[in-house]
Amino acid sequence: MTGDHTAPDLMSFVGRSNRSKFREQVLAPLLASGVVEMTVPDKLNSSKQSYRLTAVGRALKAEHRPSDD
């Protein structure tokens, strides 16, 4: 994940089709743990809402990136 992505973009990345289950089972835990943040946090249901990795998320991504051995 690089840059900002909408919920439907993220759903396609992980192969989910049910938006409410995606929010409940995937997105909410990522938001709660601080891995992902909203681009418009004061408007939860904005049509312009997107999500991006936080510093914590970028660190986890770097940690799990395969090495070039």
Image (cartoon, rainbow, N blue to C red):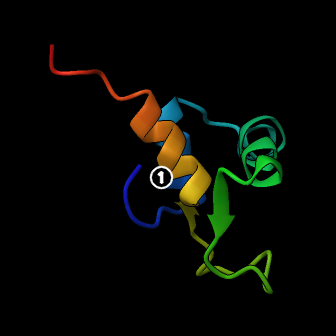
Q: Amino acid at mark 1?
A: Asp
Dot 1 crowding, Cα within 10 Å, few <14, some 14–19, many 20+ = few
Name of the residue lying farthest toward the front: 69
Left or right of 65 in this view: 10: right
Front in this rendered view, residue 34 or 44? 34
- Residue depicted at 78% across the width and 47% down the height: 33
Front in this rendered view, residue 64 or 53? 64
Front in this rendered view, residue 4 or 16? 4
- Which of the 4 image quadrants contains residue 55? bottom right
Name of the residue lying farthest toward the left: 69
Q: Quadrant of the C terminus?
A: top left
- Which of the 4 image quadrants contains residue 62? top left
- Residue depicted at 48% across the width and 50% down the height: 58
**Relative to 38, does residue 41 appear above or below in the rendering?**
below
Left or right of 38 in this view: 63: left
Name of the residue lying farthest toward the top: 69
- Residue depicted at 39% across the width and 64% down the height: 3
Name of the residue lying farthest toward the bottom: 42
Residue 34 position in % (x across, y down) = 73, 54
Q: Which residue is mark 1?
A: 9
**Relative to 66, does residue 33 appear above or below in the rendering?**
below
Residue 57 position in % (x across, y down) = 56, 49
What secondary structure is marked by label 1? helix
Q: How many marks?
A: 1
Residue 20 position in % (x across, y down) = 80, 45
**Relative to 43, does residue 37 appear above or below in the rendering?**
above
